[in-house]
Image (cartoon, rainbow, N blue to C red):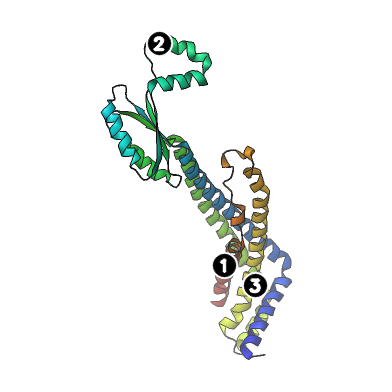
Amino acid sequence: MPRPLYHLAFLFADGVRAVRTHLALAVMTGLTIAVTLLLLGLFTAVYHHLERVAERLHGELGMVVFLADDCAPAQRDALLGWLRHRPEVAAVTQTSKEEAAATFTKRHPESAALLALLEENPLPASLEVHLDGALTAAATASLAHEVEGFAGVDAVRYGEQWLASLLGLSRWLRGGGASAGALLALATLFIVSNQVALSIYARREEIDIMRLIGATNRFIRTPFYLEGALTGLFGGGVAALLLAATHRLVGPLLATPGGGLLAGSLDLVSFGIRQVAVLAGGGALLGMVGCWASIGHFMKR
């Protein structure tokens, strides 16, 4: 075996031996890393799914332009022509005051008599704007503001308050997830550094002998970095299994017609090798950073 490979195999075996020596602590540390990565993964998934739901529903809601009672036919036609030439508008449907009253009577027959008592029809004429499904919520808001500037327009509704609440919730989840993740990561680094410190303390005489015979700091540190990386890989693997199980259990429920507002928003196929690699790499990185903090303190002595 070539000398570099022999050294690498020796260092790897030394790192595995360190994990086995403090197996219970390594498992506890790995599970802590798993919880950290699991919560970060769940926060990230929910945030992206809420944004996806908002983008999907704003296209389904469309836009309704209510015309003022004194809106002239020329003003209405000018707005119609402008809307139909917009690339983000798929179609425009006109509804007159009479058609609005007929629709109201059909949907609310119990209130038809009340509407008949009024001298004038209070329901406005409107234009129902069907938007391109790829249009973002921000672009929809921009289009609505432009429409509000036309003469003869009384109001424009596109579910802005509901969408703003949903997007606000997703932003809160992003901020809350980042804050919680940062705190959990710090706690995890503290636990990992304590695990490595315990391993260093148990092998302090061996390390002193290695120094006396000329071992470099890199040679001494590498097994501990491997110990942290292996512990982190274990935590990342557990987190990946738990997230995959969550996708498999929750996804079919949301894919059914009774899945509610979030139906169809979870993409189970998206959880694959890439996500597993990210979780495993994140766990290994947390483990190595925790080792670095502990080893750096010891090597200064």
First-in-chain label (3 vs 1): 3
Disc 3 to disc 1, C-alpha distance = 12 Å
The kind of secondary structure element at disc 3 is: helix
Q: Residue at 63%, 77% (x, y): give it.
A: 223
Where is residue 221 drawn, in percent x and y?
A: 59, 78
Q: Residues within 10 Å of mark 2 (few under 14, many from 20)?
A: few
Q: Are marks 2 and 3 in contact (CB under 8 Å)?
A: no
Q: Residues within 10 Å of mark 1 (few under 14, many from 20)?
A: some
Where is residue 257 drawn, in percent x and y?
A: 63, 39
First-in-chain label (1 vs 2): 2
Q: Which of the two marks, 3 or 1, is nearer to us in this view?
A: 1
Judge whether 153 appears above or below 233 on screen: above
Q: Residue at 38%, 24% (x, y): give it.
A: 96
Where is residue 149 drawn, in percent x and y?
A: 28, 35
Q: Residue at 30%, 38% (x, y): give it.
A: 82
Q: Residue at 58%, 66% (x, y): give it.
A: 281
Q: Which residue is mark 3?
A: 227
Where is residue 208 drawn, in percent x and y?
A: 63, 83
Q: Are marks 1 and 2 in contact (CB under 8 Å)?
A: no
* Disc 2 residue type (three-letter): Leu
Q: Which residue is mark 1?
A: 285
In this rendering, position of residue 16 left or right of residue 54:
right
* Disc 1 residue type (three-letter): Leu
Using the image, tell me which numbered label, if any, was put on residue 118: 2
